[in-house]
Amino acid sequence: MSILQDLIINKNGVEQALSKTVNMRGLQFLDMTVSAPSITPTYLTNPGLDGQIESGTAVYGARTVSVNFLFKGKDLHDFELGCRAIHAFLFSREAFYIRSTLMPAMRYKVRAKPYEMTRLSLTDMTFTVEFDLPSGFREAFQTTQEADFSNDAATWPIGMNIPL
């Protein structure tokens, strides 16, 4: 089963959907997965006592968001230009937000890591970009004061326990 999705990137307040970005033709967003939360408890060790004692509250650590792509170039020149455009689209000196149209109301503040591509042919490749998610949390795309909760609104946040 295939669900058509799109990746939306927000850099410096400017939002771009991958499918609507002109110089990204040939690049297809396949899917996005987020690693499981990592919890770091704090323990104290007392000399002469077996085991450890939990001290304070456990904290959540950073996570990783993995995004899979397929790129199909028209020819070798298009492939090389596409690789440059992909780098400009996905990498930034500043952290930025990404979200998927599958869960459009939830976004992640991330920073891209280097990636390796798998060449399928002279002009086609697949690759996975891992993004650092330092906070470990996703956040709502809009606050409840900003969101339009009319019945036809595209900003209804699935999974946020807002009553019907």
Image (cartoon, rainbow, N blue to C red):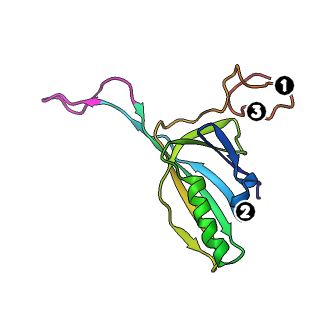
Verify CB contact (< 8 Å) between mark 3 and mark 2. Answer: no
**Quick check: is 73 in the magenta stretch?**
no
The mark that comes first in sequence, 1 or 2, is: 2
Q: Quadrant of the C terminus?
A: top right
Q: Residue at x 72, y 74 (%)?
A: 74
Residue 86 in the image: above or below residue 150: below
Q: Which residue is mark 3?
A: 155
Left or right placement of residue 139 versus residue 149 in this view: left
Residue 137 in the image: above or below residue 113: above
Quadrant of the image occupied by residue 42: top left
Q: Which residue is mark 2?
A: 25
Magenta part, dominant SS = loop
Q: In terms of secondary structure, where does tag 1 sit?
A: loop
> Camera-side residue: 48 or 123?
123
Quadrant of the image occupied by residue 80: bottom right
Quadrant of the image occupied by residue 19: bottom right
The outermost residue toward the bottom is 122
* Mark 1 residue type: Ser
Q: Which residue is mark 1?
A: 150
Left or right placement of residue 15 versus residue 3 in this view: left
Q: Residues within 10 Å of mark 1 (few under 14, many from 20)?
A: few
Q: Position of residue 114 (x, y in %)?
A: 47, 59
Q: Position of residue 27 (x, y in %)?
A: 68, 62
Q: In terms of secondary structure, where does tag 3 sit?
A: loop
Q: Quadrant of the N terminus?
A: bottom right
Start and end of the magenta stretch?
A: 43-58
Label 3, label 1: how far apart the Cα atoms are:
9 Å
Label 1, label 2: how far apart the Cα atoms are:
34 Å
* Mark 3 residue type: Thr
> Camera-side residue: 74 or 116?
74
Label 3, label 2: how far apart the Cα atoms are:
26 Å
